[in-house]
């Protein structure tokens, strides 16, 4: 451990005099991550999907939910050069839909993860840093959210709110619902980390030297809590994308927005004949989720101090 | 033993707030959007006046919402899950679905544990070997795959193209597969059990492997080896016991996840269970039925968690201490 650290500190000193210690920790983590082949592969896959999502309006041959194939006579056509992933019997080009779905599914994954981080860190910090009735109540609520069959309630919320109040929200409704039901894991994680770090000797030493609460919070606790949150959030993105696919597959999503789940849902009607309609979007799901999972595992290895040598 | 009993009571008491929390959420959902009758009108195109009247009585719409909730909870605690918008008792309908769901889930879970633990150990013992790479690759795909999608793909290959296995349901409608009612049921179980086992397996294998790797690195294992114990004893008696405890938690969590995920997997296979029924009921906004299924699934998950807690306490005496 001391080897890697001192080496990076020397590098750090060369670059910018003697700046903050935390930056060198990230440099160490990046060096460890670079050595992890599957983590890098995951990052490459994620990068590819992010590129597709950003460039989707330019690289997709047809606009979203367009029935172009109906007029060109290609409706229900199997994969070909013109339609690499085939065409739905309704005339929708599967390749274009998968590309548009990339953008929407990443939006759901990232958006819900952002909400999860905001709520989870706030709740976890309160439950971890304070004591007494409020902290206990919050902890109780968190544990309830951890045990409940969230997917069932997510489906119900999606159906009811889409039907009644927020019909115009589209995918953002799904993002909000996923975030609402998903924060408990991060909250418990943050609480546990704060509990652990708070009692470590170096914090007590810092306190004995007269450091204030804010300094301890931001200089020591936040950086320590940050790395597990990053790891879990990467894995959460994967989980939320999978959940969105389930929601849309069951017909509880937004029927007017291209998502991978919606395509699988439409294809499910035709699996006897047009297998390509549900095959290709599912493949996209597998690789995208795989990318985030590999990257998350790589980050976990790179950021886990117990594995440092 | 006294500590074990105390622990059991503490866990049982924890179930009460969780159950109440779920009941509040489930009940709130049906009332979140305002008038529950308006909601049902969306699902049911033309409800008859008799149905509407029954619904008004069912919801006790003349009372404030918290009284209605307490009323519903009171009935629930007496085993009355209410009446579905189709006019049938929710409790009567749920029984058979619960049995088919549990059959599928428990068979898959037991298979996943039975295969996952030895494979995870093997993978850890031969870290970075070809076997290890194969196992971890297969596992991470299982971990990244929508369960129901894998099911659909297998249906396309094995039912529609090869014609080896049935594509939907729990029993043959027009003819019996493999000529016998029991074998017919088995034939219908093969694909869903395979899919659920594979996905459950992936989680277990990954966790067993990483825990074994961590435990095998520790000093007491080195000490055990250097005192001349056989590799077998070191692995199974010394390392496994410490590596297995977190697996118990994950098994319970993934069982809960599989139960909550049942709507998708059961819809893919048209499996006549709670999940399939939930998906259909939620689409037509049959709120009483949906609430009933959610409560029953919650109870199943809580039971699984309790079993997990007890196993955990048996394997690891430290958790029994306050």
Image: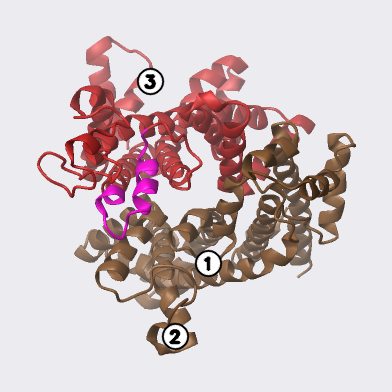
Chain of the residue where label 1 is placed in the rendered structure: B
Q: Of the residues tagged 3 and 2, which is closer to the observer?
A: 2
Q: Residue B275 vs residue A283: left or right?
A: right
Measure the alpha-carbon separation of dots 3 and 2. Answer: 66 Å
Mark 3 crowd level (few <14, some 14–19, many ≥20, 10 Å Cα): few
For residue B183, the mark is 2
Task: Provide the letter of the chain coloured red.
Answer: A
Q: Position of residue B219 (x, y in %)?
A: 42, 59
Secondary structure, mark 1, is: helix
- State the quadrant of the C terminus of chain A: top left
Marker disc for residue B305: none
Up-down relation of residue B299 to residue A301 (above or below): below
Circle on res. B105: 1
Sequence-first disc among 1 and 2: 1
Residue furthest out toward the bottom: B180
Compared with residue B196, is residue B84 higher up or lower down, i.e. above or below?
above
Residue B293 lies, in percent from the top left, at 66, 56
- Using the image, name the chain to which the residue with label 3 belongs: A
Q: Colour of chain B?
A: brown
């Amino acid at each position: 451990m001391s080897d890697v650290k001192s080496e990076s500190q020397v590098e750090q000193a060369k670059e910018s005099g003697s700046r903050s210690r935390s930056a060198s920790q990230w440099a160490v983590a990046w060096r460890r991550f670079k050595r992890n082949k599957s983590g890098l592969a995951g990052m490459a896959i994620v990068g590819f999907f992010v590129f597709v999502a950003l460039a989707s309006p330019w690289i997709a041959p047809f606009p979203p939910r367009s029935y172009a194939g109906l007029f060109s006579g290609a409706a229900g056509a199997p994969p070909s050069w013109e339609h690499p992933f085939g065409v739905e019997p309704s005339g929708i080009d599967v390749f274009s839909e998968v590309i548009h779905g990339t953008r929407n599914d990443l939006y759901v994954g990232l958006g819900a993860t952002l909400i999860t981080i905001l709520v989870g860190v706030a709740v976890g910090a309160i439950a971890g840093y304070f004591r007494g009735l409020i902290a206990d109540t919050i902890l109780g609520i968190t544990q309830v959210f951890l045990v409940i069959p969230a997917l069932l309630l997510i489906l119900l919320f999606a159906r009811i709110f889409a039907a009644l109040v927020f019909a115009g929200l589209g995918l953002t409704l799904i993002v909000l619902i996923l975030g609402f039901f998903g924060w408990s894991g991060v909250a418990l994680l943050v609480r546990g980390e704060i509990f652990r770090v708070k009692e470590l000797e170096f914090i007590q030493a810092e306190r004995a030297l007269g450091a204030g609460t804010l300094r301890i919070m931001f200089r020591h606790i936040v950086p320590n809590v940050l790395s597990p949150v990053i790891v879990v959030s990467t894995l959460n993105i994967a989980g939320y994308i999978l959940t969105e696919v389930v929601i849309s597959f069951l017909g509880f999503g937004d029927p007017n927005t291209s998502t991978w789940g919606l395509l699988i849902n439409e294809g499910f009607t035709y699996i006897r004949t047009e297998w390509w309609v549900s095959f290709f979007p599912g493949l996209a799901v597998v690789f995208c989720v795989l990318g985030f999972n590999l990257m998350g595992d790589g980050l976990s290895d790179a950021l886990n101090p117990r594995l440092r040598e | 033993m006294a500590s074990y009993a105390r622990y059991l009571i503490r866990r049982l008491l924890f179930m009460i707030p969780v159950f109440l929390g779920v009941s509040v959420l489930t009940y709130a959902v049906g009332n979140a959007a305002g008038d529950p009758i308006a909601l049902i009108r969306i699902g049911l195109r033309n409800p008859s006046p008799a149905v509407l009247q029954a619904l008004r009585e069912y919801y006790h719409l003349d009372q404030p919402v918290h009284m209605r909730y307490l009323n519903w909870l009171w009935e629930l605690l007496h085993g009355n899950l209410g009446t579905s918008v189709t006019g049938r008792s929710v409790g009567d309908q749920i029984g058979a679905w619960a049995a088919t769901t549990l059959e599928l889930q428990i068979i898959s879970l037991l298979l996943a544990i039975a295969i996952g633990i030895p494979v995870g150990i093997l993978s850890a013992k031969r870290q970075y070997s070809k076997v290890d790479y194969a196992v971890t690759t297969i596992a991470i795909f299982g971990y990244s795959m929508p369960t129901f999608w894998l099911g659909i793909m297998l249906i396309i290959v094995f039912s529609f193209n090869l014609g080896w296995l049935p594509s939907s349901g729990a029993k043959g409608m027009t003819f019996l597969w493999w000529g016998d009612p029991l074998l017919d049921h088995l034939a219908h179980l093969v694909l869903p059990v395979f899919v659920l086992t594979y996905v459950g397996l992936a989680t277990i294998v990954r966790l067993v492997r990483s825990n074994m790797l961590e435990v095998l690195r520790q000093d007491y294992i080195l000490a055990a080896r250097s005192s001349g114990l056989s590799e077998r004893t070191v692995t199974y008696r010394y390392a496994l016991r410490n590596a297995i405890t977190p697996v118990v938690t994950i098994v319970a969590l993934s069982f809960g996840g599989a139960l909550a995920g049942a709507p998708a997997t059961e819809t893919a296979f048209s499996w006549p269970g709670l999940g399939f029924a939930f998906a259909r009921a939620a689409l037509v906004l049959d709120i009483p039925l949906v609430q009933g299924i959610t409560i029953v699934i919650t109870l199943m998950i809580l039971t699984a968690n309790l079993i997990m807690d007890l196993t955990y306490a048996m394997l690891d005496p430290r958790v029994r201490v306050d």
